[in-house]
């Protein structure tokens, strides 16, 4: 996997994690809430979002890797079926 894809995936994971954390806490996108956060609180939220979101993203990537297969070529498949039938008879 190229470095640009890895970086994009990491950014997406972080963004999804932060969105999940914000939604689970009932936050809205009002600027007053962002101004009230201390850097320590923001870091804690980011860590919690990462801990929660990383396994979700990992399982999704793993699932896609397992089901990402190439469709069989119909000609090759028919030849295999005919070959197997010829050997049985």
Image (cartoon, rainbow, N blue to C red):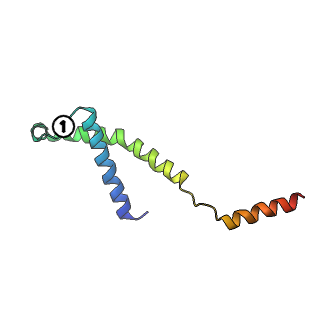
- Pick whichever, 38 or 26, lies toward us: 26
Classify residue 40 by image quadrant. Answer: top left
- Residue 64 placement, left or right of 43: right
Q: Is residue 51 above or below residue 86?
A: above
- Residue 47 placement, left or right of 80: left
x and y, in percent, of residue 39 in the image: 15, 41
Query: Which residue is label 1 attached to?
Result: 28
x and y, in percent, of residue 59 in the image: 46, 44
For image coordinates 69% across by 67% down, the residue present is 75
For image coordinates 40% across by 65% down, the residue present is 2
For image coordinates 35% across by 64% down, the residue present is 4
x and y, in percent, of residue 61 in the image: 45, 50
Which quarter of the rendered picture does the C terminus lie within?
bottom right
User: Outermost residue, top direction?
Assistant: 25
Which quarter of the rendered picture does the N terminus lie within?
bottom left
- Pick whichever, 58 or 72, lies toward us: 72
Q: Secondary structure at mark 1?
A: loop
- Pick whichever, 76 or 46, lies toward us: 76
- Residue 60 placement, left or right of 68: left
User: Outermost residue, right direction?
Assistant: 89
Q: How many marks?
A: 1
Q: Residues within 10 Å of mark 1 (few under 14, many from 20)?
A: few
x and y, in percent, of residue 48 in the image: 30, 37
């Amino acid at each position: 996997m190229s470095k640009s894809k890895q970086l994009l995936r990491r950014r997406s994971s972080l963004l999804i994690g932060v969105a999940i954390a914000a939604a689970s806490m009932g936050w809205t996108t009002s600027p007053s809430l962002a101004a009230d956060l201390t850097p320590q609180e923001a870091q804690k939220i980011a860590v919690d979002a990462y801990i929660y979101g990383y396994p979700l993203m990992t399982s999704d990537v793993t699932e896609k890797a397992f089901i990402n297969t190439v469709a069989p070529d119909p000609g090759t498949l028919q030849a295999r079926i005919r070959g197997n039938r010829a050997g049985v008879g």
